[in-house]
Amino acid sequence: MTTAVLTPSRSGVLRRQIRIVVAITITWNVIEAAVALAAGGTASSAALIGFGLDSIVEVLSAAAVAWQFAAPDPEKREKVALRVIAVSFFGLAAYVSVDATLSLTGLRDPEHSTVGIVLAALSLLVMPFLSWFERRTGRELGSASAVADSKQTLICTYLSAALLVGLLLNSLLGWAWADSIAALVIAGFAIREGIEAWRGDACCAAPVAVLTGEREPEHCDDTCCKAP
């Protein structure tokens, strides 16, 4: 795959765009977490509390990218940022799996919450755009961490959909298990994306292409990323 050479001015524009979209993502998720945790506590809803904790995980991932691009040379911080994003994927998968298992075994039941339905619906409107914009910008810039964070945001979108469907089906049809099945599938994707993010710095050759599925990871020896 041929990658266009970016001019310094274009690189600067793309870095500013990433900082802006990351700031918006962090702000949205902080508000989302506060509302979800408060509503979940009021309604004794483990599903909503879990959604709030997921928003905190997304804040951690976005903050890692913000920290990276706050530096004059963001590429030097990419390895650490990718590791933080990978760990956030694994944490998200672990919580979702435990939460879904508790629901399926009958140890907790998703409860109706009007606030939860509205919050999940709003998230479905906002998150896909933020994910698309960050991924497009990150791919043009060649930032594996920005692309990985955009996938974290996309998975949070899927969780919003699972929460919305689960709350609606539980309220309308009494199907308390519906969101748990969807959540387990999403957890599987989160584990896969976490592994890819962790390996994103294994080689300096086209890490973004690996993360986006455009090429398979290649084996590299210890000299692959050394300057010639």
Image: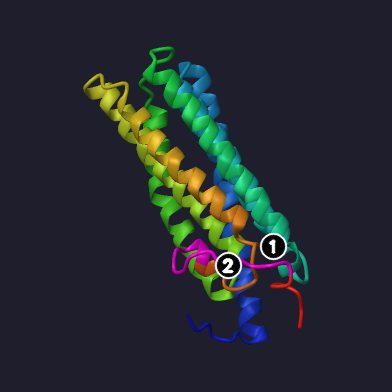
Residue appearing at x 67%, y 49% in the figure: 84
In the rendered view, does 102 fall on the left or right side of 10?
left
User: Where 116 falls versus 160 (above or below)?
Assistant: above
Residue drawn at x 44%, y 45% as measured from the top left: 189
- Within 10 Å of disc 1 (Cα), the crowding (few <14, some 14-19, many 20+) is many
- In the image, which residues are magenta? 210-222
Q: Give the label on residue 207, or none.
A: 2
Which quarter of the rendered picture does the C terminus lie within?
A: bottom right
Q: How many marks?
A: 2
Label 1 sits on a secondary structure element that is helix
Camera-nearest residue between 140 and 32: 140
Q: Is residue 56 visible?
A: yes
- Side (left or right) of 120 relative to 13: left
Return the mark for residue 61: none
Q: Quadrant of residue 5?
A: bottom right
Dot 2 or dot 1: first in sequence order is 1
Three-letter code, disc 2: Pro
- What residue appears at the point 51 percent right and 51 percent down from the top-left corner? 193
Question: Which residue is label 1 attached to?
Answer: 78
Residue 20 in view: no
Whole-percent x, y for residue 132 in the image:
45, 62
Q: Secondary structure at mark 2?
A: helix
Residue found at the very far left of the displayed protein: 173
Q: Residue furthest top?
A: 107
Q: Residue at x 50, y 18 (%)?
A: 42
Return the residue nearer the eye: 79 or 159: 79
Q: Nearer the viewer, residue 10 or 209?
A: 209
Measured from the top left, where is residue 21 in percent x and y? 57, 60
CB contact under 8 Å: marks 2 and 1:
no
Q: Position of residue 222 (x, y in %)?
A: 73, 67
